[in-house]
Image (spheres, rainbow, N blue to C red):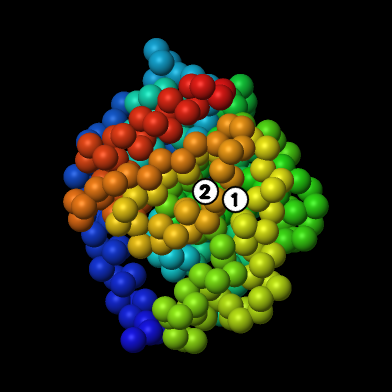
Amino acid sequence: MKSGKVSLNLLKFFINRSIAKRRKTYPPHTFREKINIPYIDDGNKQHTYDVYLANEENRKHVCVINIHGGAYILGRHFDNYPFGYEMLKEGYDVVLIDYQFNNGKIDTLDLLKDCAANLRHLFDNLEEYGLEKDQFVMTGDSAGGHFALLLSEAIINKEVASIIGLDLPKFDVKAILLNCPVYDFTNLGVGVLSNSGMKRMLGPKYNDKEHMKALSPKTYISMIDVPLFVSTCKLDFIRAESLKLNEDMKGKKGYAFLDIDSDDKRVDHVHNVTRPQLEESKTVNNAMARFLDIYL
């Protein structure tokens, strides 16, 4: 049976409640922070972001820009704080960015334009945040992995930005880290979601194949020439997406793929982001940190 709009709304409710509960139990920190910074001054909480600086004793002056997932319909930037905390402990500065949700009326491109606006605001204020000497890494999970990869492709190649219609700041993407990402956006949800569900999750242009192809990271993957790390796991419900990406990237220099083989039900989609204290999650997060140590 295909899932529709009502099913997605119920899923949104239960996942939001679970994320909020996990985040409340995460330990306090001693990192310097600027939180809930508005990048569009319209009162919309989704148009805010957080900046954290690692402690000076092990600070690497590498900034991890993270985009949260949530099936394009849920989540907040601060939901990814547990993941950010693990990167901060490793000496990486962290920025958690945000965007509005699809609701059947706005398009996925609108979400990407929010991310682009967030990045422009960040890069207009690097000195204020103490990030002006940093190198920058794009990261994301699930839908956020889709956005992190596609935005990186558009930053690296102006032609991609022009095709999509994005106004992005100029900066060097030094590496990309993806956890259980959406890769082939053109076929996402086909056969699983009803028409109402597709519209709710992907926007009103979900049936426009050319539009969806333009918003798919798979379309431009041959242009990626920076170090790329991808993780998935046996119980990742969109594991096939990571496998497609791995097939297209296999054998390329500066590419690493980690597939966690575990039957533990907690080790599922983006487990290293939502449950970073699991041993399997530590394996992924440590592997990402070591990957950056090698290539930066």
Count the labels in the image: 2
Between residue 104 and residue 31, name the one nearer to us.
104
| Residue 95 vertical placement versus 209 (above, below) | above
Residue type at the position of mark 1: Asp
Question: Are discs 1 and 2 less than 8 Å apart at CB?
Answer: yes
Quarter of the image where one finds residue 165:
bottom right
Residue type indicated by callout 2: Asn
* Residue lying at the far top of the rendered structure: 57
Viewer-proximal residue among 205 and 268: 268
- Residue 278 figure quarter: top left
Q: What residue is disc 2 on? A: 246
Q: Which residue is mark 1?
A: 248
- Residue 52's place in the image compared with 199, above or below, is above
> Which disc, if any, is residue 90?
none
Picture residue at 48% right of the left edge, 22% below the top: 293
Residue 180 makes an appearance in the image: yes
What percent of the width, then of the height, locates residue 208? 66, 79
Residue drawn at (47%, 28%), measured in percent from left and top? Answer: 291
Q: In x, y percent, where is residue 272? A: 32, 44
Q: Position of residue 42 (x, y in %)?
A: 56, 61
Is residue 273 in view from this perspective?
no
Picture residue at 59% right of the left edge, 69% below the top: 186
From the viewer's perspective, tell me whether residue 242 is left or right of residue 148: left
User: Label 1: how many residues lie within 10 Å, few (<14), some (14-19) or many (20+)?
Assistant: few
Rendering coords of residue 43 (x, y %): 50, 60
Say what secondary structure mark 1 lies in.
helix
Nearer to me, 86 or 114: 86
User: In which quadrant of the rendered view does residue 29 lie?
Assistant: top left
Q: What residue do we see at 38% from left, 45% from top? A: 259
Give SS at disc 2. helix
